[in-house]
Image: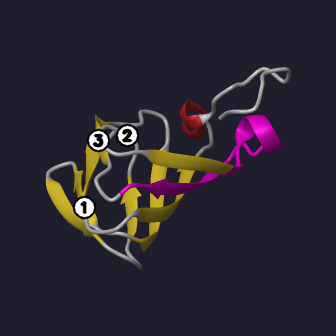
Amino acid sequence: AAGGTMRVRILLDRDGQGARHGGLAWLDADADARVPEHRHADATELLLVEEGDGLMRLGDREIRVRPGVTIVVPRGVLHDFRGAGTQRLRALQVYTPSGNEQRFRVRVPLDAPPPG
């Protein structure tokens, strides 16, 4: 995430559990996190916001992000996110089919020392 930090915990995915039809992740982002404009050519993205606020551009619409909001991003639609800077964003994210969540996966060799 540009500006701020986003932590992603993959809960269910194609590579880890063999879930081909959907990937599930937990997003936890700083209040000032920004996700640059992008699109997913081969998956629909769903977001269920538990905490946080901001603005998401979805195609030519702007959506106010707040707790309880569910956002559906159809495949191929340009979208971005700008945190309002008031509270961290916590949301469940689903990709269907799975696969796009792999961009968040960091592969660390098993013999690498623990971080920190």
Q: Quadrant of the N terminus?
A: top left
Kindly state the secondary structure of the residue where label 2 is placed. Answer: loop
Circle 3/circle 1 CB separation < 8 Å: no
Inspect the image, locate mark 1, and give the three-letter code of the amino acid beneath it.
Gly
Residue 1 is marked as: 2
The quarter of the displayed image where residue 36 is located: top left
Q: Badge 2: few (under 14), some or many (20 or more) residues near its Cα, within 10 Å? A: some
| Residue occupied by mark 1 | 85
The quarter of the displayed image where residue 76 is located: top left
Inspect the image, locate mark 2, and give the three-letter code of the amino acid beneath it.
Ala
Mark 2 or mark 3: which is in front?
Answer: 3
Name the foreground residue: 75 vs 104: 104
How far apart are labels 1 and 2 at the CA level?
Answer: 14 Å
Magenta-colored span: 11-30
In this view, 93 is above or below 112: below
| Residue 100 shows up from this direction | yes
Kindly state the secondary structure of the residue where label 3 is placed. Answer: loop
Q: Residue at x 47, y 64 (%)?
A: 90
Q: Position of residue 70 (x, y in %)?
A: 41, 70
| Residue occupied by mark 3 | 3
Kindly state the secondary structure of the residue where label 1 is placed. Answer: loop
How far apart are labels 3 and 1 at the CA level?
Answer: 11 Å
